[in-house]
Image (cartoon, rainbow, N blue to C red):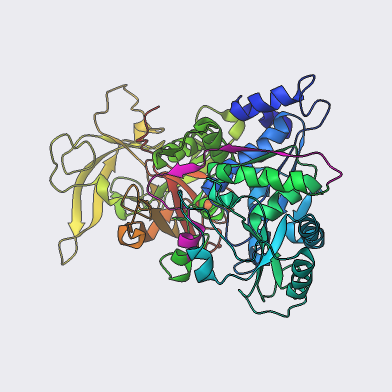
Amino acid sequence: MAEERSAEMSQNFIHDFIDEELAPGGRCEGMRVHTRFPPEPNGYLHIGHAKAIFVDFGTAEKYGGLCNLRMDDTNPTKEDEEFVDAIQEDIHWLGYDWGDRFFYASDYFEQMYDFAVELIKKGLAYVCQLTPEEFKEYRGDVNTPARSPWRDRPIEESLDLFARMRAGEFPNGAYTLRAKIDLASGNFNMRDPVIYRINHMRHHNTGDKWCIYPMYDFAHPIEDALEGITHSLCTLEFEDHRPLYDWVVDHITLPYHKPRQIEFARLGINYTVMSKRKLRNLVESGVVSGWDDPRMPTICGLRRRGYTPAAIRAFSERNGVSKAASTVEYAFLEHCLREDLNEHAQRVMAVLRPVKLVITNYPAGQTEEFEVENLPGKPEAGARKVTFSRELWVEAEDFLPEPVPKYKRLYPGGPECRLKGAYLIRCVGYKTDDQGNVVEIAAEYDPDSRGGDPADGRKVKGATLHWVDAATALDAEVRLYDNLFSDPDPDAGDKDYLACLNPNSLEVLSGAKVEAGLSDPQPSDRFQFMRQGYFCADSRDSRPGHLVFNRAVSLKDSFKV
């Protein structure tokens, strides 16, 4: 699979850098390209992570290299094994694999501690006891250097305090370990940044062994270096952190090469939010049913909705890799899915808002079968048989008692219409209930039009309608999804993103009718419900006898390529 996908990733500025470094005399001459994907296990992966996965794993594949999967678990506050497992499942579903190169940042805590001690001994780190309020007050501004009265604390004193921090003698916030770099730097990340803090909290991987934890900016370059990463690919918000990344690997004793950090623009999509904090709040406040709610931009939510790995990879590739931040239309993600499903999704018939159609001149008690191609024009996809009898289900919207201009479907005295793959019919009447609702449509069929074409070659002016045999139809619940937010930019500025929620993001149709062949669909199956869109069985709620289908995307494509 990797060989087949390697061509997916076109040349970009990251690869230009790598090509230069692999060339004779370059930094990585003779080395194997080695990348990593380092998510924090504090939530589920979303579509923005899919781009990073594509860049990290795709770059390694393109160069015949390796890509590690590493859990960036240096902050135990929100991290959990549930998220670790979900991250691995999502990456595998997207079609990537890390082999035996799975790591936790916490695997290196002992080495990180030793490196911190080395910095203290070199006079490049010190224990600081500023309170959070004092730390903010002493931070300075663009014209004023930061300051700390503890910057010149004796090395032996810092070593003693740091050891006692590890031993658990002090409460949270009492002390931090700071790198001694440049309090006057224009880059605030270099103003003696904190590299260790106290946090008395159980860690999902190390338990209660540690009560001090390294900061990401200290831990990440060490992890990359220890794992032999050649190119640390990350999103643009870490560009200002790169000097600190380089400072760390330059000032500790590593028997390994020094990795290079390269930043690219993260993925932004309209009509959604991708902050883990906000997504978590949507889940915990009950706005959505869970991380895998099909309206969520999470990988598991998209999978449950009916998205395919191929569509998400195509979306990531076609958006390109650049330094320029941009917002992509959600409609383009849908466009990529339609392209994939149009080629592979089996065509079936389902009636979402059914009304009974009775063919009055069809023999009572008679049943016949029609053979229908699973994918029109692709005989290799096979065919199936659907039954036909006197009573059928058709869409309520395919009938009007009194037609409006240009209406070419069923109405009394209207034109002949085709029943898809079956016969021509003409509406001759209808019945209503006490409230005036149409409950039955009467029609007559042309027995000589089997297959949907009249024997005499006459032109049919009416529409082609899908249908389901009432005698064999299965009941189903159908869920129609729309954007979770009605505002195209709910994450902008000071907006209250919760006030931007779309009240019509989910419509549930409980009385749908589907073909008998859909009695046990698998969540990985994708279907085109003719004239309705692309659907899949809900992975959580659907089962034989209680069918639930999610609409992945409608047939209409609003995105212009």
Identity of the residue furthest to the right in this view = 255
Identity of the residue furthest to the top in this view = 24
Using the image, determine if residue 96 lies above or below residue 481. above
Residue 90 x/y as whole percent: 63, 52
Residue 47 x/y as whole percent: 52, 47
- Please indicate, yes or no, whether residue 307 appears anywhere in the rendered image: yes
Along the viewing direction, whichever of 305 and 287 lies nearer the viewer: 287
- Please indicate, yes or no, whether residue 470 appears anywhere in the rendered image: no
Region of the chain picked out in magenta, as a range:
254-280
Quadrant (top left, top right, bottom left, bottom right) of the N terminus? top right
In this rendering, position of residue 338 left or right of residue 358? right
Q: Report if residue 275 lies within the magenta region.
A: yes
Q: In which image quadrant can residue 201 be found?
A: bottom right
Along the viewing direction, whichever of 140 and 439 lies nearer the viewer: 140
Using the image, determine if residue 223 lies above or below residue 558. below
Q: Report if residue 25 lies within the magenta region.
A: no
Q: Residue at x 19, y 57 (%)?
A: 431
In this rendering, the count of numbered labels is 0
Residue 91 x/y as whole percent: 65, 48
Quadrant (top left, top right, bottom left, bottom right) of the C terminus? top left
Using the image, determine if residue 535 lies above or below residue 178. above
In this rendering, position of residue 540 left or right of residue 366? right
Q: Residue at x 56, y 44 (%)?
A: 240
Residue 125 x/y as whole percent: 71, 58
Using the image, determine if residue 375 lies above or below residue 366. above
